[in-house]
Image (cartoon, grey):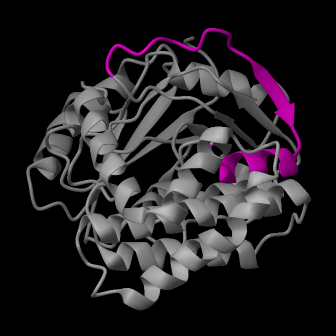
C-alpha cells in the first residue's frame, strides 16, 4: 500500500540497544510507505542514542528526539507534539511489528471512519501461528472500554491506532505521574470518548516478553503502588458506568492485586509490606464470589484468583514456572 494518509509511528526508547535496530527496521519495512518514524530517546545510558542517530542518517523517514530521562509517558507525549500524521501508532522500542501492521491498522480505523481501532491479539511466542479466523467488529465505546480493561487484551497503548485530530481536540495525552499502567489509563480515556471503535483480532505486533529490563519484568514496590494509582485514576475518571465495565474493572484490580501479592511472596518481602499484602489479598477474597458468578469471566481466571486466595505461596510457585516458560518461548527478533 503506497498511498494513503501519513501515519506517525512513535517509538519511546530507553536502554534498548539490543532491540532498537530490529524495531526500527520492522517499521521501515512496512508495506504502507507513507509513514514517519519518531524515535524518542528517553535519556538512554547505553548505545541506543548512537544507534538511532545512525539509522536517521540513512533515511529521512526516521526522526530522533533526544531528551532527559522523564519516563515513557513523557517520551510518548514528546513524540505526539511533533507528529505530523493523520494517524498515530505506538511501538515500544524492544518490540517489533509485521510488515502489514500499519496497513492493517489503517484499514481497521477506516472501516467506520473511527477515532480509535485496535487488535485484541498479538504475537508473544516463538513460531506462533496467525489467528485462524480474522474478524473485524464495530463496537460502542462501552464495549471497547470493557474489552480493554478485561484480561482478553494485553495492557498497552501499542497494537492500536488513533486519529491524531481526535487526541488533540480532546487534549488526550499520557499522564506523566504514571509509569506503570499509564497505557491502560490512556487507552480507556480514548475509548470512552470515541464515538465509534473498530476491533480486529489479526496478529501484527510482536510483543517481546524476554526483556528482563522491561517495566513488567523487574520487581519494584513503587511500580506496584503506581499501578494501583493508575487503576484508582481510571475508576475515578470513568464516564461510562455499565455493569460490564464496572465488573471488568473489579476483575482487573483483582488480577493486579493477586499479581502484586504473588510478587511479594516470590521476592520473600512479606515482612516488608505486611499491610499491603493483607489489604490486597482481602480485596480479592471479598470480590471472588462476585466474580465467580459472572458468565463473562473465564473459568481459568476464576480458578487463578481462587488459587491466589487459598494459597498465594502455591500460586507464586506456579507463577515462577510460568514466567520461566514465557521467557523461554518469547518472540525473538
Q: Locate residue 144, reporting x and y percent.
A: 78, 45
Q: Between residues 98 and 154, which one lies in front from this camera angle?
A: 154
Based on the picture, tell me whether residue 148 belongs to the magenta stretch: yes
Left or right: 136 as drawn, with respect to 126: right
Residue 316: % across, % down: 34, 57
**In front of the other: 16 or 306:** 306
Q: Which residues are magenta?
A: 126-151
Left or right: 138 as drawn, with respect to 53: right
Depicted 91 relative to depicted 258: above or below: above
Give the residue at x 57% y 11%.
Answer: 1
Horizontally, residue 138 falls left or right of residue 297, namely right
Residue at 74% across, 57% down: 291
In the displayed image of the protein, which residue is found farthest to the front?
Answer: 310
Residue 117 visible (yes or no)? yes
Farthest residue toward the bottom?
Answer: 275
Foreground pick, 27 / 255: 255
Residue under the image location 56 percent in, 59 percent down = 255
Query: On screen, 57 above or below 74?
Result: above
x, y (%) of residue 81? 51, 60
Quarter of the figure that contains the C terminus: top left
* Residue 210 colored in magenta in the image: no
Point out residue 193 in the picture as x, y percentages from the top left corner: 82, 58
- Residue 229 appears anywhere in the view: no
Amino acid at each position: 500500500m503506497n498511498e494513503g494518509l501519513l501515519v506517525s509511528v512513535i517509538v519511546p526508547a530507553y536502554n534498548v540497544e539490543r532491540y532498537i535496530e530490529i524495531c526500527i527496521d520492522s517499521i521501515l519495512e512496512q508495506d504502507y510507505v507513507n509513514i514517519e518514524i519518531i524515535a524518542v530517546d528517553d535519556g538512554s545510558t547505553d548505545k541506543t542514542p548512537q544507534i538511532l542517530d545512525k539509522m536517521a542518517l540513512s533515511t529521512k523517514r526516521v526522526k530522533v528526539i533526544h531528551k532527559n530521562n522523564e519516563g515513557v509517558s513523557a517520551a510518548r507525549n514528546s513524540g505526539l507534539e511533533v507528529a505530523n500524521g493523520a494517524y498515530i501508532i505506538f511501538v515500544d522500542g524492544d518490540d517489533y511489528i509485521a510488515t502489514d501492521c500499519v496497513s492493517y491498522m489503517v484499514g481497521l480505523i477506516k472501516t467506520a471512519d473511527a477515532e480509535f481501532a485496535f487488535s485484541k491479539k498479538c504475537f508473544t511466542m516463538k513460531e506462533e501461528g496467525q489467528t485462524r479466523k480474522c474478524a473485524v467488529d464495530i463496537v460502542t465505546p462501552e464495549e471497547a472500554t470493557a474489552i480493554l480493561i478485561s484480561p482478553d487484551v494485553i495492557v498497552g497503548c501499542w497494537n492500536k491506532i488513533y486519529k491524531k485530530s481526535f487526541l488533540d481536540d480532546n487534549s488526550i495525552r499520557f499522564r506523566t505521574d504514571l509509569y506503570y499502567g499509564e497505557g491502560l489509563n490512556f487507552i480507556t480515556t480514548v475509548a470512552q470518548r470515541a464515538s465509534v471503535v473498530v476491533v480486529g483480532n489479526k496478529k501484527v505486533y510482536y510483543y517481546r516478553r524476554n526483556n528482563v529490563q522491561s517495566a513488567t519484568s523487574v520487581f519494584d514496590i513503587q511500580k506496584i503502588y503506581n499501578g494501583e494509582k493508575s487503576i484508582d485514576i481510571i475508576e475515578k475518571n470513568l464516564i461510562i458506568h455499565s455493569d460490564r465495565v464496572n465488573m471488568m474493572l473489579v476483575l482487573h484490580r483483582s488480577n493486579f492485586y493477586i499479581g502484586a501479592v504473588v510478587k511479594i511472596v516470590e521476592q520473600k518481602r512479606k515482612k516488608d509490606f505486611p499491610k499491603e499484602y493483607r489489604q490486597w489479598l482481602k480485596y480479592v477474597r471479598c470480590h471472588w464470589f462476585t466474580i465467580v458468578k459472572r458468565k463473562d469471566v473465564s473459568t481459568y481466571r476464576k480458578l487463578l484468583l481462587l488459587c491466589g486466595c487459598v494459597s498465594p505461596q502455591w500460586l507464586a510457585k506456579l507463577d515462577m514456572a510460568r514466567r520461566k516458560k514465557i521467557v523461554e518461548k518469547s518472540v525473538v527478533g
